[in-house]
């Protein structure tokens, strides 16, 4: 993520569901955890997001937020008509709850934020640019109206989706019964306020205002966010495995609550759009998939807009839809076909990742030195959230206009490499002009995948491809499914099976290659900020924790392998040390791994990082110079400066360590990982 001094307050947020003992997403039902933005039954206090950045720490933390309630981790994204057109790119996507009975979904809540990443291919020149559409709460307007990009003739547009919750469903605007407006009408509607006269029986609410530095309750919707048509269709569509438990009753919020504000905003938007000459988009029935054949699909119910956009969010397996959970794409296959044709024609040159400070090739999304259990997932898109919970594209102009805005980011494998690992290793991700940000160079998932396809495996090691035991490509019963795995591979430009590795080979290569690279690069990583400061003390311990967890979530122990990594957590549950069974020396100058002399780390430490003798130090997490900080607690010193990497917000309750220091644990580490498997680690 680009961070510059021109942006007032830059806080990097990522939402995470809790750990559960049932494993990653295989059971498809998760216990929701406390969100960063406090959500109550009567109001959505998204102002907490803005309030959290006041002061010097710039960290969002759920700790101490007593009013925080459980977040709904399953949300639906309403896709506008003609999503691959310039107007479709500039039309805000709308977020709503998949099952309203589980609570609302709010884009400004980092635990529920959905992201859209767009890439534009000019077939005449072979050049690629990016444009990331904005996402707002259903029935509301963005903080800044997006400007439609000027697309080249015959442009090939691809879209990729990411999500900070558990499962993101897609729904076409036609099925949602929303209005289809022209660009002019959309801009006009964006200028409307929630003070328009509501329909009879609609609670009234004043337009939210905020004195300087005093955020108010957001105009973000609660249970009655979207129209009844949206919620009725979502209920009929159900969760990704077809089990809907919502009733047909919609909640009416009290007058003056945030939910009432959202209802008034919905009415105002519809009224203004109608005055501007918009028309209601007719509901068009999508094409039913062929019977008895597994096919890529965007939703459990055929949806014309999604089908016309070539959208894929999972697989229709035996007549039941099985979601990729957090990930989806539209027209990705066609985009990669056009890009690869341009590469073959010499029109598009994919830059070499380069050589890292350690003398090895810079890492890509298909390098076993950095992949995890579900490689190539989620996107590099970021949004701005203002004090009222309204969302804007993350551009320099918007950041300047939205003082004290908060940056919302999608935890992703691509983002982990582009924003954290590359800078630490002295590498630079491939970037192209961002059409929404005056041509400022920006990274993107399709760029990462094209570069990985071109260079992964050239340094002697194998190129990692999505394996059958990747949790995102398992079917609804947790079984491996070749068709679903191939569909996922297709949206990230990977060859179909049997290309790549078997699950056992994938586990073996991940363990043997990544453990070595982490130890070789410890001096480059250990002094860098952790992507999630309340989970790991620095980038080295974070990556070690991620590798340790991936071993268990891929069930690598079933192949006769032993987890090479064990970790130590402090009293706050923060991973502060990592040990490796197969020890390797660092290849760059520095103090090295403080626990390099240990093959198994103790599960917990009273204060800081254990020494090689196994005795905890007086206090602290090691820095690049090996100097401990205070009591292992992340401090503002871990926040990157304006010149570098984004700030990571601690938004997840840490695991609780119990057990026997790794002895006999199938996870190979301590019980912090054998008893708690993560939902998604940057990741």
Image (cartoon, rainbow, N blue to C red):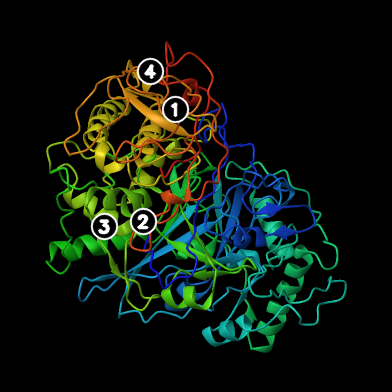
Residue 669 located left or right of residue 520: right
Q: Where is residue 504 in the image (x, y as percent from the top left)?
A: 30, 24
Examine the image and state in which quarter residue 665 appears.
top left
* Residue position for label 2: 645
- Report which quarter residue 598 is drawn in: top left
Most distant residue in the top direction: 664
Report how far apart the C-alphas of labels 4 and 2 lie in the structure. 33 Å
Q: Residue 642 location, x and y as percent? A: 38, 63
* Secondary structure beneath label 3: loop
Q: What element carries label 1?
A: loop
The residue lying toward the viewer, choosing from 225 and 220, is 220
Q: Which of marks 3 and 2 is nearer the N terminus?
A: 3
Which of labels 4 and 2 is toward the front? Answer: 4
Q: Where is residue 424 in the image (x, y as percent from the top left)?
A: 28, 49
Give the labeled residue for mark 3.
Answer: 429
Between disc 2 and disc 1, the foreground one is 1
Label 2 to label 1: alpha-carbon separation:
30 Å
Considering the numbered disc 4 on the image, is that residue within a helix, a strand or a loop? loop
- Real-space Cα distance between discs 1 and 3? 39 Å
- Label 1 or label 3, whichever comes before in sequence order: 3
Instruction: Check disc 1 and report the residue beneath it.
Output: 618
Q: Where is 305 relative to 622, above or below?
A: below
Please state if 525 lies on the left or on the right of 669 as rendered: left
Q: Which of disc 1 and disc 2 is earlier in sequence?
A: 1
Front label number (1 vs 3): 1
The residue beneath circle 4 is 614
Task: Name the one closer to the observer, 29 or 665.
Answer: 665
Mark on residue 326? Answer: none
């Amino acid at each position: 993520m680009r961070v510059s001094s021109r942006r007032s307050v830059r806080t990097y947020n990522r939402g995470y569901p809790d750990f559960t003992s049932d494993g990653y997403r295989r059971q498809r039902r998760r216990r929701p955890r406390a969100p960063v933005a406090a959500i109550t039954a009567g109001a959505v206090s998204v102002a907490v997001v803005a309030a959290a950045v006041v002061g010097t720490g710039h960290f969002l933390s759920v700790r101490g937020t007593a009013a925080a309630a459980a977040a709904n981790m399953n949300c639906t994204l309403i896709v506008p008509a003609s999503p691959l057109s310039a107007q479709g790119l500039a039309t805000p996507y709308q977020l709503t709850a998949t099952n309203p009975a589980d609570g609302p979904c709010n884009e400004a809540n980092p635990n529920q934020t959905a992201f859209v990443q767009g890439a534009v291919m000019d077939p005449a020149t072979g050049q690629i640019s990016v444009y990331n559409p904005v996402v707002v709460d259903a029935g509301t307007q963005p903080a800044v109206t997006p400007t439609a990009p000027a697309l080249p003739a015959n442009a090939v547009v691809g879209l990729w989706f990411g999500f900070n919750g558990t499962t993101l469903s897609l729904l076409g605007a036609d099925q949602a019964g929303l209005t289809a407006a022209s660009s002019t009408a959309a801009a006009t509607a964006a200028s409307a306020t929630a003070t328009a006269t509501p329909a009879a029986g609609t609670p009234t609410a004043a337009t939210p205002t905020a004195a300087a530095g005093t955020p108010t309750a957001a105009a973000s919707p609660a249970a009655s966010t979207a129209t009844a048509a949206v919620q009725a269709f979502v209920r009929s569509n159900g969760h990704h495995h077809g089990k809907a438990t919502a009733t047909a009753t919609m909640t009416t919020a009290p007058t003056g609550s945030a939910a009432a504000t959202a209802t008034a905003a919905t009415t105002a938007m519809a009224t203004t759009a109608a005055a501007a000459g918009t028309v209601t988009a007719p509901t068009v029935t999508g094409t039913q998939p062929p019977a008895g054949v597994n096919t890529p699909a965007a939703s459990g119910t055929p949806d014309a807009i999604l089908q016309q956009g070539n959208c894929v969010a999972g697989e229709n397996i035996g007549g039941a839809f099985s979601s990729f959970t957090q990930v989806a794409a539209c027209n990705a296959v066609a985009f990669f076909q056009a890009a690869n044709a341009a590469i073959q024609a010499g029109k598009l040159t994919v830059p070499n990742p380069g050589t890292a400070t350690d003398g090895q090739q810079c890492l890509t999304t298909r390098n076993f030195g950095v992949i995890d259990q579900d490689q190539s997932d989620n996107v590099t898109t970021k949004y701005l959230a203002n004090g009222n919970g309204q969302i804007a594209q993350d551009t320099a102009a918007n950041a300047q206009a939205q003082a004290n805005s908060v940056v919302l980011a999608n935890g992703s494998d691509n983002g982990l490499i582009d924003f954290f690992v590359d800078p630490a290793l002295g590498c630079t991700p491939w970037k192209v002009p961002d059409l929404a940000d005056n041509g400022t160079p920006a990274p993107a998932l399709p760029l990462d995948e094209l570069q990985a396809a071109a260079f992964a495996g050239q340094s002697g090691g194998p190129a990692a491809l999505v394996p059958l035991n990747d949790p995102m490509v398992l079917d609804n019963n947790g079984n491996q499914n070749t068709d679903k795995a191939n569909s996922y591979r297709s949206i990230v430009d990977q060859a179909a099976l049997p290309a790549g590795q078997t699950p056992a080979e994938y586990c073996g290569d991940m363990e043997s290659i990544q453990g070595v690279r982490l130890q070789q690069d410890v001096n480059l990583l250990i002094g860098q900020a952790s992507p999630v400061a309340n989970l790991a003390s620095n980038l080295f311990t974070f990556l070690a924790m991620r590798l340790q967890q991936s071993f268990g979530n891929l069930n690598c122990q079933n192949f006769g392998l032993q987890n090479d990594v064990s970790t130590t957590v402090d009293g706050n549950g923060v991973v502060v040390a990592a040990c490796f069974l197969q020890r390797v020396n660092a290849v760059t100058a520095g103090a090295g791994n403080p626990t390099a002399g240990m093959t198994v780390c103790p599960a917990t430490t009273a204060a800081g990082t254990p020494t090689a003798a196994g005795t905890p130090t007086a206090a602290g997490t090691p820095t690049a110079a090996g100097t401990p900080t205070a009591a292992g607690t992340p401090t503002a010193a871990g926040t990157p400066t304006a010149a570098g990497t984004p700030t990571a917000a601690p938004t997840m309750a840490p695991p609780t360590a119990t057990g026997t220091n790794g002895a006999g644990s199938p996870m190979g580490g301590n019980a912090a990982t054998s008893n708690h498997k993560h939902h998604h680690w940057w990741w």
